[in-house]
Image: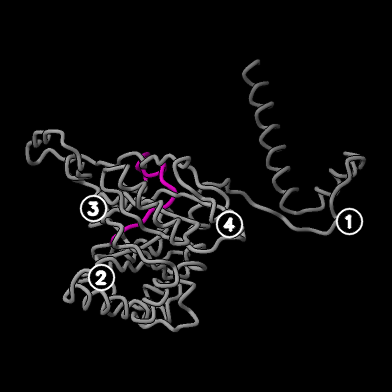
C-alpha cells in the first residue's frame, strides 16, 4: 500500500499493529485504533529471521488443515506482500470532524543476524513494497553496519522482554550515531501489560534506551498489539512513557513528533534523488545570450580549457593516424 503525504494535521501514530495472517482481525485492530484517536496506523508484518521456512512466516488462524512441513534444511527467503486492508470498511468520521486525515502504512520487521541477512534485505525486491522497514539487530556489529549503511532501514527494534540485548547496554555512542543518521528506535508496551515478570524486563530495557538516547531522542512508542486488549489510547500510551523514564513534557513526542520523523524518512526514500545549485539571479545565463560569448566565458575556466585541449589533441592524433593509414 502506498504511503500518503504526511500533512501538518498529523496527530498520533500507532506504529506497530501486528498482522498474524488474519485480515479481519487486523481490520478490527485498525478500527479500534481509530476510535481511540490515532489518525495514523502502521500494520506490521514480522517475519523474524529473513532466512526461514515459509510456513513459519504467518500462522493462519483458519480452520483449514495444516500444510505439510517441508524438509529441514530447505530454507528460502520469505517476505510476503504487504497486507491489504479495505479502508472503505473503516469509519474515519471522528477524525474528519477533528480536522485530521486517516493514513495507513505497511511495515516489515526482520531479524538481522549477520552481514548476509543485511545484504539480502537491502536488495530484496519484496522489501521495497513496504512503506517502512524495521530491523531487529542481533548484536552491535549489525548495528554498526546499519549506522553506516542503514539508508534502507527506518526503525530499529528489539525483543522487549529479552535479557540479552548486547547493543543496548554499553553502546550509547553507536546508538547516538544511528539517530544522527535518521534511524529511529522503538519501544512497544503490549508485553508490559501481560504479567509482572515481563513487565519488569520491558521497563528495564525501555529505561536503558531512554537513558542512552538522552531522554528519548529518536524513540517511538507503539503497542505491538496482537489483540484489542493490547491497545491503549494515545494519552494513556504517552503516560506509559513516564514509567519508562521519560519526562511528562516529552511524552507526546513518542507518538507524534518522533513517529512523524520516522514516517517522513520512509517516504523520502520513495522520492527521486537529485542535486540543486543555488545562485544569484543575475548569474543565470539568459536564453538570448550569444553562444560565442558563452563559449568564451567557459574558456576562461582553467578546468574547461584544459579538458578542451585534451579533446582537441586527441582529435588531431586520430586524423594524423587515419592519414598514415590512407598512405
Q: Is residue 242 visible?
A: yes
**Which dot, 1 or 2, sits closer to the camera?**
2
Q: Which residue is mark 1?
A: 282
Q: Secondary structure at mark 2?
A: helix
Q: Is residue 149 visible?
A: no
Q: Is residue 183 left or right of residue 204?
A: right
Q: CA distance from mark 4 to mark 1?
A: 44 Å
**Which dot, 3 or 4, sits closer to the camera?**
4
Q: CA distance from mark 3 to mark 4?
A: 34 Å
Q: Which residue is mark 4?
A: 100
Question: Badge 2 local density, few (<14 within 10 Å), some, or many (20+)?
Answer: few
Q: CA distance from mark 4 to mark 2?
A: 29 Å
The quarter of the picture where the N terminus appears is top left
The residue shown at (40%, 77%) is: 239
Position of residue 282 measured from the top left corner of the image (x, y, whole percent): 89, 56
Q: Which residue is mark 2?
A: 193
Q: Is residue 97 left or right of residue 186?
A: right
Task: Name the foreground residue: 278 vs 153.
Answer: 153
Q: Earlier in the sequence, mark 3 or mark 2?
A: 3
Position of residue 146 measured from the top left corner of the image (x, y, whole percent): 37, 61
* 215 part of magenta stretch: no
Q: Secondary structure at mark 3?
A: strand
Q: Earlier in the sequence, mark 1 or mark 2?
A: 2
Which region shows up in magenta? 123-136
The residue shown at (48%, 68%) is: 258
Amino acid at each position: 500500500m502506498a504511503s500518503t503525504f504526511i500533512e501538518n494535521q498529523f496527530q498520533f501514530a500507532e506504529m506497530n499493529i501486528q498482522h498474524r495472517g488474519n485480515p479481519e482481525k487486523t481490520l478490527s485492530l485498525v478500527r479500534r485504533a481509530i476510535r481511540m484517536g490515532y489518525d495514523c496506523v502502521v500494520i506490521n508484518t514480522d517475519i523474524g529471521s529473513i532466512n526461514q521456512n515459509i510456513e513459519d512466516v504467518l500462522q493462519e488462524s483458519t480452520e483449514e488443515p495444516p500444510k505439510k512441513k517441508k524438509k529441514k534444511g530447505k530454507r528460502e527467503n520469505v517476505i510476503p506482500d504487504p497486507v491489504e486492508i479495505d479502508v472503505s470498511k473503516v469509519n474515519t468520521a471522528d477524525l474528519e470532524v477533528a480536522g485530521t486525515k486517516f493514513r495507513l502504512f505497511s511495515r516489515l520487521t526482520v531479524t538481522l543476524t549477520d552481514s548476509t541477512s543485511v545484504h539480502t534485505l537491502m536488495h530484496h525486491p519484496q522489501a521495497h513494497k513496504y512503506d517502512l522497514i524495521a530491523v531487529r539487530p542481533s548484536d552491535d556489529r549489525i548495528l554498526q553496519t546499519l549506522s553506516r549503511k542503514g539508508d534502507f532501514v527506518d526503525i530499529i527494534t528489539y525483543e522487549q522482554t529479552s535479557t540479552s540485548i548486547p547493543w543496548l547496554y554499553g553502546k550509547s555512542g553507536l546508538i547516538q550515531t544511528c539517530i544522527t543518521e535518521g534511524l529511529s528506535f522503538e519501544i512497544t508496551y503490549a508485553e508490559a501489560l501481560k504479567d509482572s515478570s515481563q513487565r519488569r524486563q520491558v521497563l528495564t530495557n525501555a529505561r536503558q534506551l531512554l537513558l542512552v538516547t538522552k531522554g528519548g531522542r529518536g524513540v517511538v512508542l507503539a503497542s505491538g498489539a496482537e489483540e484489542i486488549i493490547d491497545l491503549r489510547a494515545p494519552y494513556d500510551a504517552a503516560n506509559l512513557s513516564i514509567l519508562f523514564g521519560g519526562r511528562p513534557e516529552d511524552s507526546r513526542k513518542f507518538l507524534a513528533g518522533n513517529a512523524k520523523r520516522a514516517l517522513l524518512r520512509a517516504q523520502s526514500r520513495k522520492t527521486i534523488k537529485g542535486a540543486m545549485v543555488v545562485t544569484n539571479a543575475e548569474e543565470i545565463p539568459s536564453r538570448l545570450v550569444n553562444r560565442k560569448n558563452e563559449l568564451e566565458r567557459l574558456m576562461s575556466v582553467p578546468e574547461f580549457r584544459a579538458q578542451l585541449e585534451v579533446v582537441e589533441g586527441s582529435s588531431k592524433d586520430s586524423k594524423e593516424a587515419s592519414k598514415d593509414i590512407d598512405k
